[in-house]
Image: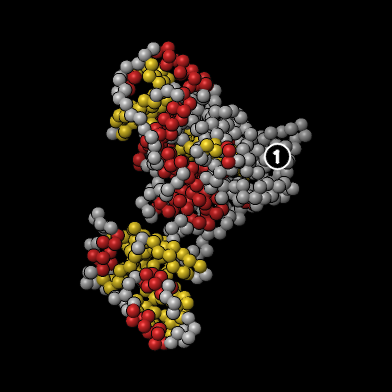
Amino acid sequence: MSKITIKSGKGEITLKKSSRYVGLKSKKPVTDRDAVKKEVLSNLGGFKIVTLNKDGKTIDETLDEVRKEKEVEVGTHVYYVPGMSQRPMVPTGEIYVVFQEDVSEEEQMLILDEYNLQMVERRSSDRIILKVTDKSPNPLKVAAALQKTSLVKMAEPDLDALVEEYEFSEPFDTLYAHQWQLRNPGFITDVQWTTKKGADAKIVDAWARLGNTGSDKVVIAVVDNGFDINHPDLVEKVHKPFDLWSDSSQIEMGDSRFTHGTPCASVALAVSNGVGIVGAAPAAKFMPVSGTSFSLRATEKIFDYCIDNGADIISCSWGTTDSAFDLNPMKIAAISKAAREGRNGKGCIILFAVGNDDLDYVSYYAAHPDVIAVAATTSKDEHADYSNRGREVTICAPSNGDWPITAARASWDEGISWETGEYRWWRDGRSRGSNYKHFGGTSSACPLVAGVCALILSANPELTAAEVKEILTQTADQVGGPSEYINGHSLKYGYGRVNADKAVAEALRRKDSGNEPPVVDDSVIAAGRGIFRFQVRRQEPTGYGVQIGAFAEYGNVLIQAEKLESLFDAPIIVSINELNGKTVYKIVVGAFEDKDDARTLLNRVKDQGINGFIRAIKDLA
């Protein structure tokens, strides 16, 4: 009985058995038993909630063994509501029963005898409280069986759970109502401007599901320039700052040329302090990494710093679409290293903005296969016309293009003045406070998704970077017309607009089910799961092709192989080798005897905005 559906309150709930926790009543401390690993709650429904040393056994087998111990009075499974909450629920053993009218007491006693139940209290002629005995089935099974009995009108098991104590309430920051990207009511407060109701990232719903605004154990690194770390929405959150240009922890501030990092960081994680705005993950720690650079050495230093100093998420609202600044293999490797080795091997979650050039290809950084490439939509749920498009777009998120985002402003930000001097920091010239400004672009969409990733990790910190990306794509809301999507993916929107609430629900679901994903649509290719047609032949180590990249995730190999074969109608060669104890997949398009033929294909590859270089196939081994 891994799941059971019972009537409760005014409806039905489906409960799933926890694979981690059980409840015990014991004549001596539960932690004195060898089978008990840890006590996690001292009293829930009269039980001690513990984890067990399963030693390869199932939770059922282990609990059955513990129940046989002399000092154990009662052992019960712990349950939760999948997809809704990870709050543990324990059946206390009592069942509230309401019989149909005219059912006699003698008939009622037959029910007690059939299930070996004991009467605790009679409330009226048709209402009684029963209790299971050591000869009774599980109280949930008893209640479910009674609910199907013609004599019974209602049978509800008594379940105990931790109450919320109203610890979560929506932020009361003064500009919170202006932040339509968190929850879009269909209008902009204080101006006559209509938006599309529900065209938001569902952040507030995700907070409600979590019961809080995220975990302070999650660290978001924002890599940018122009951080005002004294800003009231950021100052309390700064964690292990690093300035690339000074090679120190002292963040340089005050240069009017650099102001971009402050609003970007605030969209992701501005603290909820009753003043100004609030970020998508206001409890997360803020790791400012100041100084962006095309330099190979600087790129390696940026991502190595994030790995070495505990960044969970790396948000980058910068990049380039200039072909002169394409990523070389060493920069690709630096990003891949963070995605593979960060978070003690679970991988840093890396996000890049796709760029604001209105092009049919994305920034070269965003095109990296280990990256979450973020495009932008508007407050009317439409594609923002500046947002770059392409096959590499992972997901989109609300930003400007209709009405802008309200974000933090660096104290030295001079704004954008028109001749009248009224524009400055606000689109309509109407000030909402000197510490804030209107903001937008994919620069704003990217950290918003970074904040969503922080909420996902708050729900389930054991997820890998690849699993977080998978959850984002699986739970996104498709916006735009159905014709925009091919196999679930749109060149404009990626897999759709980010839905924080669905993403958090899926993270919670996986937390207690061993991270096994549900059956999903074609987007499961991102995890290397699904049904695929292969044609495998041995490739002789001769000739030349165009190497596209080296990948650590098998799902990325499937994505790239399918894309490249359809684009160039050429054979796809995959070299599988070990590097530093890790499996590495290198993908090459084409197999030509003549190097000039490979060079012709390379030009076609670059015309599609894809990075590549000529590779002698013999060198793949």
Which residue is found at the position 39% from the left and 82% from the top? 120
Percent from the top left, x then y, of residue 290?
Answer: 50, 34
Image quadrant in which you'd find residue 388:
top right
Which SS class for mark 1? loop
Which residue is found at the position 43% from the left and 42% from the top? 524
Q: Is residue 348 in view?
A: no
Residue labelled with disc 1: 427
Residue placed most toward the observer, 410 or 135: 135
Quadrant holding the C terminus: top left
Q: Amino acid at mark 1?
A: Arg
Quadrant holding the N terminus: bottom left
* Residues packed near mark 1 inside 10 Å, few (<14), some (14 to 19) or many (20 plus): some
Figure check: 534 above or below 115: above
- 481 sits to left or right of 429: left
Residue placed most toward the observer, 443 or 116: 116
> Coloring scheme of the render?
secondary structure
Figure check: 255 above or below 409: above
Percent from the top left, x then y, of residue 401?
Answer: 65, 38
- 557 sits to left or right of 408: left
Figure check: 149 above or below 519: below
Figure check: 343 above or below 174: above
